[in-house]
Amino acid sequence: MYAAGPNRRSPTRQGSRVTDWTTEATDLIEQTVAVARDRTVVPARIATRAVVYGLLASLIALPAVVMLIVAAFRGLVLLYGGRVWAAYITLGGIFVLGGLFSWSKRNP
């Protein structure tokens, strides 16, 4: 049945036509998978990177801000000659001014 006889075409001609069809089908499937990947995996990868780097930045920035506030307080206590209440008032005033500025920039 599959043997090439004198009345049949050679397998290379028939095979090349089948090969072209299979190649086109394979290319179409590959292109469809690539489009699906670009629409799903790429945005998910970008979002994952944003979350990971955001968490990393916050885990580094939060302790740094706390240490800077503590250092500022201790520096003000030394500057005011041991008057802790003056350091509290100074830092409290700075934070109140920062809060008022942030409050004025909010969206109503």
Image (cartoon, grey):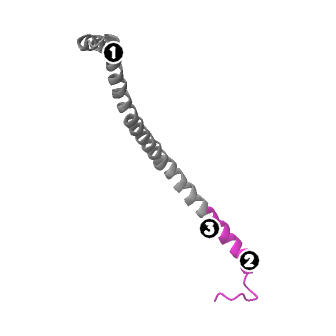
Instruction: Name the residue that disc number 1 marks.
Output: 78
Q: Is residue 55 above or below residue 97?
A: below
Tell me the mark number nearer the camera, choosing from 1 and 2.
Answer: 1
Element under label 1? Answer: helix
Label disc, if present, on residue 39 of the rendered structure: none
Q: Check if mark 3's residue and mark 2's residue have beta carbons within 8 Å.
A: no
Element under label 2? Answer: helix
Which stretch did the figure color magenta? 1-24
Residue 78 on image: x %, y %? 33, 15
Q: Quadrant of residue 80?
A: top left
**Residue 102 shows in the view:** no
Quarter of the picture holding the C terminus: top left
**Neighbour tally class for label 2: few under 14, some 14-19, many 20 plus, Cα within 10 Å:** few
Residue in view at x 57 percent, y 55 percent: 31
Left-right relation of 79 to 18:
left
Instruction: Name the residue that disc number 2 marks.
Output: 12
Residue 37 on image: x %, y %? 50, 52
For the residue pair 32 and 46, the one nearer the viewer reads as: 46
Residue 52 on image: x %, y %? 42, 42
Residue 86 belongs to magenta span: no
Left-right relation of 71 to 17:
left
| Type of amino acid under label 2 | Thr
Q: Is residue 37 above or below residue 75?
A: below
| Type of amino acid under label 3 | Thr
Element under label 3? Answer: helix
| Type of amino acid under label 1 | Leu
Tell me the mark number nearer the camera, choosing from 3 and 1.
Answer: 1
Report, in whole angstroms, how far the alpha carbon at label 3 lies from the one at label 2.
15 Å
